[in-house]
Image: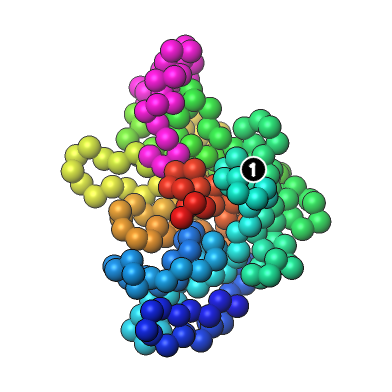
């Protein structure tokens, strides 16, 4: 278990672990403490971390450890595995690319839980760059908040090769579709896709409030039918692709 130490400060005793199924708020990274000054944050293993407070300080406690599937290759290129312990003895799941638009997520026994998938370029202006395809359940997608029905209809008819190149240069995994009105940006929300004729989404399962501050907290619904391991996999890939979280 990670023992935290910060410069001249005394080492902080380890926090009680939290089982992955109980996590509802988490971030991804190596920083160990939530503070404005980077020099006071400390660094530890690349991990999915949950918040804890002690002595007036806010800590980012590792809950799951992120291990690249192929040495120094980026997580978005080669995939990764999540372990419940820093020593890598207790595998929780793996997320590995299959050569298509999928990262297949499997449990420790090789059973497929679902896939994290890349959004096609024809939908990238209206949808976030990654979505979930759970086994036996409807897709979980996130729309950009500024998307309009007219844009969705036009994109639904498809675009040419030149337009695809333009879209790819304009839209990235990390673009959360902020408001142009000067108002506070709305959160990015991944929700269950439905057959609603008006395009309304169903149950929200994963939320990213867009505060522009460190750290980026993600919230997953406690009682959702979605396997949280899929949400963890999507967030780790998103942070790697959009913010280079695995290269810090």
SS category of the residue bearing label 1: helix
Q: Is residue 56 left or right of residue 233?
A: left
Q: Residues within 10 Å of mark 1 (few under 14, many from 20)?
A: some
Q: State the extent of the magenta-drawn residues as a range.
A: 149-175
Q: Quarter-wise, where is residue 92 in the image?
A: bottom right
> Which residue matches tag 1?
78
Q: Residue at x 56, y 76 (%)?
A: 2
Q: Is residue 15 visible?
A: yes
Q: Is residue 89 left or right of residue 130?
A: right
Q: Quarter-wise, where is residue 217 in the image?
A: bottom left
What colour scheme governs how the chains and residues are painted in the rendered image of this protein? rainbow
In front of the other: 189 or 198: 189
- The answer to whether 244 is drawn above or below residue 163 in the figure is below
Q: Residue at x 73, y 50 (%)?
A: 106
Q: Residue at x 45, y 39 (%)?
A: 173
Q: Report the magenta stretch's main SS.
A: helix
- Is 98 inside the magenta-drawn segment? no
- The answer to whether 8 is drawn above or below residue 183 in the figure is below
In front of the other: 135 or 162: 162
- The answer to whether 127 is drawn above or below residue 248 in the figure is above
Q: Is residue 231 visible?
A: no
Residue 129 x, y percent position in the rendering: 48, 37
Q: Residue furthest right?
A: 109
Q: Residue at x 81, y 56 (%)?
A: 109
- Is 171 inside the magenta-drawn segment? yes
Residue 16 x, y percent position in the rendering: 56, 82
């Amino acid at each position: 278990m990670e023992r935290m130490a910060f410069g001249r400060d005394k080492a902080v005793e380890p926090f009680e672990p939290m089982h992955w199924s109980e996590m509802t708020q988490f971030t991804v990274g190596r920083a160990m403490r939530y503070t404005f000054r980077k020099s006071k944050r400390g660094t530890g293993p690349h991990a999915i971390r949950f918040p804890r407070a002690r002595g007036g300080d806010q800590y980012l406690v590792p809950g799951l450890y992120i291990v690249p599937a192929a040495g120094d290759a980026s997580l978005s290129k080669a995939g990764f595995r999540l372990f419940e312990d820093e020593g890598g003895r207790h595998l929780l799941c793996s997320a590995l690319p299959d050569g298509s638009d999928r990262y297949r997520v499997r449990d420790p026994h090789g059973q497929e839980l679902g896939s994290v998938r890349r959004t096609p370029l024809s939908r990238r202006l209206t949808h976030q760059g990654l979505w979930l395809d759970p086994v036996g359940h409807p897709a979980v997608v996130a729309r950009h908040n500024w998307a309009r029905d007219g844009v969705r209809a036009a994109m639904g008819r498809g675009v040419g090769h030149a337009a695809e190149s333009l879209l790819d240069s304009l839209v990235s995994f990390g673009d959360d579709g902020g408001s142009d009105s000067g108002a506070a940006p709305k959160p990015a929300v991944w929700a269950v896709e439905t057959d609603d004729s008006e395009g309304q989404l169903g149950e929200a399962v994963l939320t990213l409030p867009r505060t522009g501050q460190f750290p980026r907290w993600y919230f997953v619904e406690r009682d959702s039918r979605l396997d949280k391991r899929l949400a963890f996999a999507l967030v780790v890939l998103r942070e790697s692709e959009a913010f280079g979280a695995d290269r810090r």
